[in-house]
Every structure is written in structure tokens, then in C-alpha cells.
Image (spheres, rainbow, N blue to C red):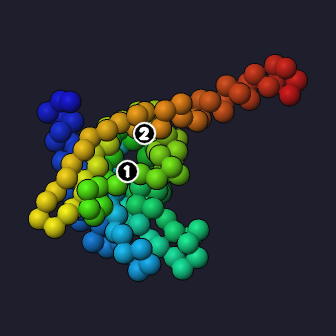
Amino acid sequence: MSKKEDLLLDRLVDEAMKVRGRAHAPYSRYKVGAAIATRSGRVFAGCNVENASYGATICAERGAIMQMVAAGEKDIVACAVVTQGEGGSPCGICRQTLAEFASDMPIELVGLDGAKVHRKRTRLAKLLPDMFTPATLRNALRKGRRRGG
């Protein structure tokens, strides 16, 4: 962990904390904020938006990714996720969506527990080992064409 990485993740945590307050979580009451940084230095934030039709809920991480893609960026280098309690890890769908844009990156997990702030640093490759990536799909399709599949 470098000082540069620490500073970047601190910035992302600040952005995720800000956006978390705007989350729409009337059903679970579990507000989440996320922020991602791209190689160009831009930061994109998202919060969870729940829906009465639970399947239509958008997680904070995917909200941030949608902002990034809409802005024409695609190269994620770091992520922070802020929740309540001891801190929550991205769900499986969010892990897979992050893997669409990065094979690995640091992820700072922050939990707000009253006056306590819990922080844990992990990596995408640790959260999603043997991930299915765009390269996985390209390789499978290439092999299938060679075999006539």
C-alpha cells in the first residue's frame, strides 16, 4: 500500500460518505454509498436506489459505474464502499460488474457504527477469485470458432 493509494482511497471514502446520505433505501434502511476512480483521475459516485419491486434495485457500486460509463470512462483503478455497521462488501453482481472494468484494484470497505468507523482494505481479485472477465468470454468464443462451435 502506497501513500498515493492511501490518499486516493481516502478521497473515495469521502465521496462515498457524501453520496450515501442521498441513498433511497426505504425498504431495507441500509444506505450504501460508493465511489470509483478511473485511470484518468476522475471520480464517480453512486448510492443504492431501492425499488418496491426488489429486483429493480440498483446497488451503489453499479450506480457509480453507470455514471462512469455515461461519462465515457471505462478504466477503474480503485473503489470505496461505505455502509452502516461494521462495513459491507460489494454483492456478487457488483463484484462481477467491477470485474468488467478492472481485473484487480484496491477496495476500501467502510462501516459507520455510531461514533466508530470501521475500515478494511481488500482487493477485487480476493473478493472475486477466478472471475469471469471480458477476456474469458473472448477466449472462449475464439476457441469455439476454431472448433466450429
The image quadrant that residue 16 belongs to is bottom left
Q: The N terminus lies in which quarter of the figure? A: top left
- Residue receiving disc 2: 127
Gap in angstroms between the C-alphas marked 1 and 2:
8 Å
Q: Which structural element holds mark 1?
A: loop
User: Residue at (41%, 51%) from the top-left corner?
Assistant: 90
Residue 10 in the image, given as x and y percentages of width and height: 18, 48
Q: Which numbered disc flags the more N-terminal residue, 1 or 2? A: 1
- The residue carrying pointer 1 sits among few (fewer than 14), some (14 to 19) or many (20 or more) residues within 10 Å by Cα, namely some
Q: Can residue 5 be seen by looking at this rendering?
A: yes
The image quadrant that residue 23 belongs to is bottom left
- Residue receiving disc 1: 89
Per the rendering, the mark at residue 113 is: none
Horizontal side of 117 relative to 44 (left or right) equals left
The image quadrant that residue 33 belongs to is bottom left
* Residues at marks 1 and 2 touching, judged by CB atoms closer than 8 Å: yes
Tell me the kind of residue under disc 2: Leu
